[in-house]
Amino acid sequence: MERYYQEEIECAPYEKIREIQSEKLVKQVKHVWDNVPYYRKKMEEKGVTPDDIKSVDDLKKLPFLSKADLRDAYPYGLLGMPLKDCVRIHSTSGTTGKRVVAYYTQHDIDLWEDCCARALTAAGATNEDVVQVAYGYGLFTGGAGLHGGSHKVGSLTIPISSGNTDRQIMFAMDLSATILCCTPSYAAYLGERMKELGYGPEDIPLKAGIFGAEAWSEEMRKDIEKTLGIKAFDIYGLTELSGPGVAFECSAQSGMHINEDHFIAEIIDPDTEEVLPEGSVGELVFTAVDKEAFPMIRYRTKDICKLTREKCSCGRTHIKMAKPMGRSDDMLIIRGVNVFPSQIETVLMNNGYAANYQIIVDRVNNTDTFDVQVEMTPEMFTDNIGEIEARQRKLSDDLKAMLGIKAKVSLLAPKSIARSEGKAVRVIDKRKI
């Protein structure tokens, strides 16, 4: 039997959802106009005022926000509330060392946790479940979001964070964890480690998992489900919009329901910025209609996907987004972390290397590998192995400080990397997703 956390809204008729969205949008645009000078200026440049926004139909009149705006307005330029009313921040890594910092009032956190509670309930969670949250905590939104959602559902929450795999398995077995929340690649690794320790799905009480923060294929889903003996659910979110729980999978496992009472989704042509009809493939754009501290309006996610309002067997009426097919920019997602070639280039240049490098990403045993090959300049070229190893360690440490994840660095002789007459091939992504 399908369970809902907030059935009245999750199964509301389309007309009711639109009514809620229109009412909240009008209020949100006024809030932003009054409190966010950065966005007000963008509205003025486009010749639009709050009086022009009367319903969801008028959304297309408003200007877009992009990652570049978030960097330009860093740190407080898009803040919609006084700092004394904000209770938390979360953050992503930024492309040039500047991070995206998102702010939350207590009200924002309550709504975010509601969204995560809906996702957990859709995966079968009740107050009798034990939820093991193995996403990272801290600035990353994964741990905090699912942790709060689990509390709202009333489940016993294990805030174990990521890593220490043998301890994860011990806790899951000793405390009878029934729902696992982590990245899909980590779920696959947990399954693999269990096998090594001689355990099978029958030795662990897990029944479901909520996996997000990185791309994963249907093949990987089937593999995780088989290895852990669970049903694996997808979840979608962005720090800019609160975190995980913007959209989530239901029992149908055929796309993620967007929490439309909090987020209005559009699909646009990434080049012309024209809004495309339902069912079209394009760039996903979100408007957060009731976020107070960090009110994103028409935020361009760069994720390429499509939306459908086809009736769902679970009974939920909110529109569904397909699993993103890729991105309209060059961002890589490696082990759940956003990585831009420009970040790597910054570290290399700061260490005196030229911009002759290649990033090689692969997936071995369901875990992303991340290699950075860098040419030494003729001046630093040496056959002293100790010196090369020391330089590689230094670069690896600096990249970890910038990105938050470790890369394997290989220093190569000058002119080792093939030159291109067109765009340089900086990224070789061998993952089959």
Image (spheres, grey):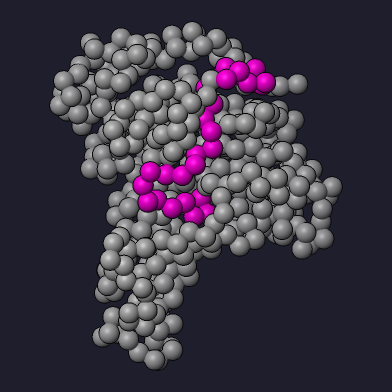
Residue 339 lies in quadrant: bottom left
User: For this rendering, which residue is in front, 66 or 32?
Assistant: 66
In the rendered image, residue 367, in percent from the top left (x then y), is placed at 59, 58
Specify whether residue 424 is painted magenta: no
Q: Bounds of the magenta span?
A: 310-336
Residue beneath the point at 52% across and 24% down: 308
User: Residue 114's spot in the image, x, y percent?
Assistant: 54, 25
- Along the line of sight, the residue nearer the viewer: 183 or 5: 183
Place of residue 170 in the rendered image (x, y in percent of width and height, measured from the top left): 74, 54
Is residue 90 shown left or right of residue 66?
Answer: right
Q: Residue at the location (71% across, 21% down)?
A: 2
Q: With respect to residue 26, does 64 lie above or below? A: below
| Residue 345 shows up from this direction | no
Name the residue located 60 percent from the left edge and 46 percent from the top edge.
217
* Residue at the far right in the pictured view: 202
- Count of numbered circles on the image: 0
Q: Residue at x 67, y 40 (%)?
A: 232
